[in-house]
Structure formats: C-alpha cells, structure tokens
Image: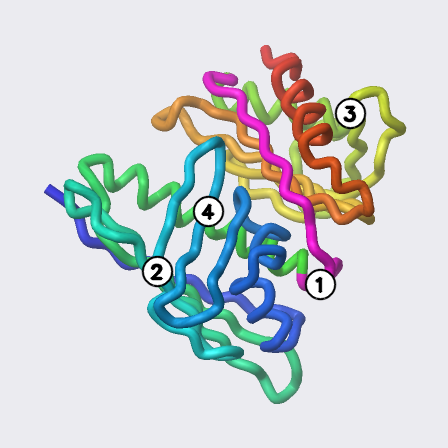
Amino acid sequence: MGHHFELHKDIELAATPEQVWAAITTGPGIDSWFMGRSQVEPREGGRTSLTMAGHVGEATVTAWEPGKRFANRTEPGPDGSFMAIEYLIEGREQGGTVLRLVQSGVLGDNWETEYEAMQTGWNMYLGSLAAYLAHFPGQAGTPVTAFRPEAGRPEQVWAAVADAIGIAGPITEGAKARLTIDGRPPVEGVVDLAGLPTYVGVRTDDALYRFLHSGTERGNVLVLGHHIFTADKDSSRTEQAWQNWVNTLPIG
C-alpha cells in the first residue's frame, strides 16, 4: 500500500532569480550542487534525467515559467509510487531570492525511512545550492561521486572522516579542514555544512566536498558527492581517485 507524502522546504539565497533559475533548470547548474548528472529539456512537456551509479531516472517537465516556477514528475511505478518536485522562485526587493521547494508523491512500504532521508538530504543539497551560488556563481562544477557500502556505523564513519580531513574533536561549521588525496598536495578548506549524523560539507577555493552517511537502515553507506570547480575536467580520473580514497579510508 503506497503512502502519499508532501515535503516543503524554503531557503533564502544570495543570488538573483535568474541565477537561481539557471542553477535549478540546466544540467551544468544542477550538476554544481545536486547528486549525479542531470539533463533538462527546457520546455513544458520536456524530459529530465538524473544519472547516478549507473541508474537513470527520468521525469516530465510539468511547469516551465522562466525565473518563476519549474516542476517535474516521474511516471508511476508498478506499485503506484511516483515523485513530483516543484520549485517556486521569489525575488526580494532588497536583493536575494527565496526558493520554495515542494516534493510530493507516493512512497512504498518503507516510507518513513525514505521520507526522513529526503528531509535530511534536502537540507544538505539546498545548503550546497546556497554555497554554490554564493561562492561559485556562473561556474559549472564537475560532479564526483563515490560509494562505500557497509562502511560502518555513523560514529565510526564520522570519526574516520574527521581524522582524514584534519579535525580533532567534534565537526562543527567554521572548523578548518585539510584534505589530501592520491598523493597530491593538501588543500585547505572550511567546514560549511555539519548535519551530523548524516552529512558533512567542506568548502575550498575550488570545490564543494560532500560526505553523506546513509544510516543503518539504509546499509551504512558512505557516499561522496563532490563538486569540483577547476579547469581539470578529467572527471573519470578524479572520481576513481576519490573511490580509492573512500575504499581505503580506515574505519574502526
């Protein structure tokens, strides 16, 4: 038996409505803050796609009002489940933009776990959207994704991540972080998202690094969802380096 749901999120963004529109309705814009790789056919009735871990999810654009409203919806599955997302953009006279998100649909039997994951996940992704618009406006980020299933319980994983990014003690926003990968020189950054026990974000001069733990009910998966803003577009090599990093991260 499917379970109907509706989720609401609002966020104030230091960007113009036009910048927000580009970030949520174009493939390069979405790739700069959201998961996986996206494509959008820019019209009502057009198709969208999200590719991640070899899986492609598609939807139909149900609203296309440039600078104001964008929405899409998946086709119902055999069990009746579907997802619909609507973004509403509202410019402010004193500058900035308010983005309102409504996600609705029908979830399956494990709906409570799925709903909680979406609630928390949107906090991270909208936080990444805000960071992207504030620090990398107009740039196209290269998404980098890596997974480690059965990585360990949340407290084990975050202790290992804290050690790897050079933080002693609790991970808090504003803490300085130091990242090293694949024998390259360390890069310096700052923790800009601390949504423990689910996610941690580190911002550097040229990247948004995102670390996500799925929770014990979802397989204790450690997910890396980074966005790199450099001229180096060899994403497959960079992705493999981060996959090696997460595979070899010592977790007690």
Residue 88 place in picture, x, y as percent: 44, 73
Residue 155 as seen in the image, left or right of residue 100: right
Three-letter residue code for mark 1? Ala
Looking at the rendered structure, which numbered label has been put on residue 134?
1
The residue pinned by badge 2 equals: 60
Estimate how packed mark 1 is, as few (under 14), some (14 to 19) or many (20 or more) residues with alpha carbons within 10 Å: few
Q: Quadrant of the C terminus?
A: top right
The residue pinned by badge 4 equals: 50
The residue pinned by badge 3 equals: 181
In front of the other: label 4 or label 1? 4
Count of marks overlaid on the render: 4
* Highlighted range, magenta: 133-151
Query: Is 134 in the magenta?
Result: yes
Whole-Å distance between the Cαs marked 4 and 2? Answer: 12 Å
Three-letter residue code for mark 4? Leu
Residue 7 as seen in the image, left or right of residue 147: left
